[in-house]
Amino acid sequence: MRALRTLSLIRPNMGDWRSSDAFTPLALAILAARTPADVEVRLFDERLAALPADDCPDLAAITVETFTARRAYAIADAYRERGVTVVLGGYHPSALPDEAARHADAVVVGDAEGAWESLLDDFRRGRLQRFYHGDTRRPLDDVRLDRRLFAGKPYVPIQLAQFGRGCRFACDFCSIRAFYPDGVRVRPLASLLDELAQLERRKLVFFVDDNLFSTRPQIDALLNAIKPLQLRWACQISIDAARDDALLDQLRAAGCRIAIIGFESLEATNLKQMGKPWNKVAGRYLDVVKKFHARGIALYGTFVFGYDHDTVDSIRRSLDFALEARLDIVNLNPLTPTPDSPLYARLRDEGRLLWREWWIDPGYRYGAPIFTPRRMSAEQLAEECFTAKRTFYAWRHVATRIARPALQLDAFQTAVVALANHISRQEVMRKQNRALGDRS
């Protein structure tokens, strides 16, 4: 038998620097809740503080996203040099397990539930396997989180919760369907309500579901169940919710105060190419925004640029729309081909990738073009997106959004939107042109 007395859970940043937009890492809270009580569990989040150079637990588990992969691998290598057994998991290792295995003693592919317990048992028995596979069809009737892990740490003052995993859509640029190929699973409402009842009511709750709108019966049940809790919450939701006025009324009545919607593009041909032609079912984008605003729900709109019918003018018109529609928060990003997405495979096969493994290439810089677009240069794509973000978050526009909002924000919403704009402005400037994994 091998001793397991100490476990370090690690959330890397894109590089060795601090960020102002750190949300609590729910994946690590899930691991902590499923770890035996006799193990001392410590959380190190590089977004908040530098990692200790002398940490030597019995086991280290690192959660890895594509943008943090290079830094995560460097951290994993350093732990292994100190003789620590390292486990990697998350979306990126699930997409590229063989790559991750070069920097770890074990890799968890898929969800942690079930796989994590098997891994810990094998570790103690001295028979650790190379790969552990979580069952992405397993019912979500045993979701547990240990939020004590986050106590005293300066995370963004927003509580995270999750109703379901997966998405009913399969967009070209998204790898969610590859991770959850069997569609959406939702939690039993009783366990979710127990969890929500324990959260601090003064804070905003953010449902991290990729799309809170799975089916109408499921979202109806959710909204009816949480309405009595009188929470104020935010969510990601597909734009087709806007064609149902009754559903929008339900969202507001149940406490929704901010909705994140993927508008993605003003070009119908691009929406078709990315597998989102249904984005137009709710009508004109301006009308969609007005419907949410009329109900006192602030909007965070996201756009991606670089599809085959995009031009420089597409980016500029999208910025103009975001300002005209008075969206409260916006993301205006160059298209990012992530591994395991149909987009990545198509661009690779067409020979258009400028950086084949951009997430670990030491020459790649955040915000740099990753591929060659059809109707503008790669440099124009990167420069115009950065200019659009800087313009939207220019102080004059931020001040206008806060002083003269498109909807009558209450004091709570005003504070949240103001904080989100401030943080977004900071992070746009902080990250641009930085090398992934950079220690400076």
Image: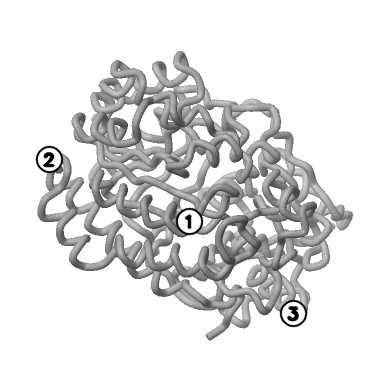
Residue 132 in sight: yes
Which three-letter amino acid code belongs to the residue tagged 2? Gln
User: Reading the chain from its start, which is encountered first: label 1 or label 3?
Assistant: 3
Residues at marks 1 and 3, CA–CA distance in whole angstroms: 24 Å
Q: Residues within 10 Å of mark 1 (few under 14, many from 20)?
A: many
Classify 216 as above or below 226.
Answer: above
Find residue 37 and report its horizontal and vertical position in percent: 60, 50
According to the picture, the residue beneath numbered tag 1 turns out to be 149
Closest to the observer: 260 or 41?
260
Q: Secondary structure at mark 1?
A: helix
Residue 408 is tagged as: 2
According to the picture, the residue beneath numbered tag 3 turns out to be 82
Residues at marks 2 and 3, CA–CA distance in whole angstroms: 56 Å
Which three-letter amino acid code belongs to the residue tagged 3? Arg
User: Reading the chain from its start, which is encountered first: label 2 or label 3?
Assistant: 3
Residue lying at the far top in this picture: please name it: 217
The answer to which quarter of the image holds residue 232 is top left
Quarter holding the N terminus is bottom right
Find residue 60 and report its horizontal and vertical position in percent: 68, 64
Tell me which residue sits at (46%, 44%) in the image: 265
Residues at marks 1 and 2, CA–CA distance in whole angstroms: 37 Å
Q: Residues within 10 Å of mark 3 (few under 14, many from 20)?
A: few
Closest to the observer: 93 or 188?
93
Closest to the observer: 177 or 411?
177
Classify 84 as above or below 291.
Answer: below
Residue 141 in sight: no
Please identify, in this view, whether the residue under mark 2 or under mark 3 is nearer the observer: 2
Classify 338 as above or below 115.
Answer: below
Find residue 28 and report its horizontal and vertical position in percent: 57, 53
Find residue 422 and report its horizontal and vertical position in percent: 27, 64
Which three-letter amino acid code belongs to the residue tagged 1? Leu
User: Reading the chain from its start, which is encountered first: label 1 or label 2?
Assistant: 1
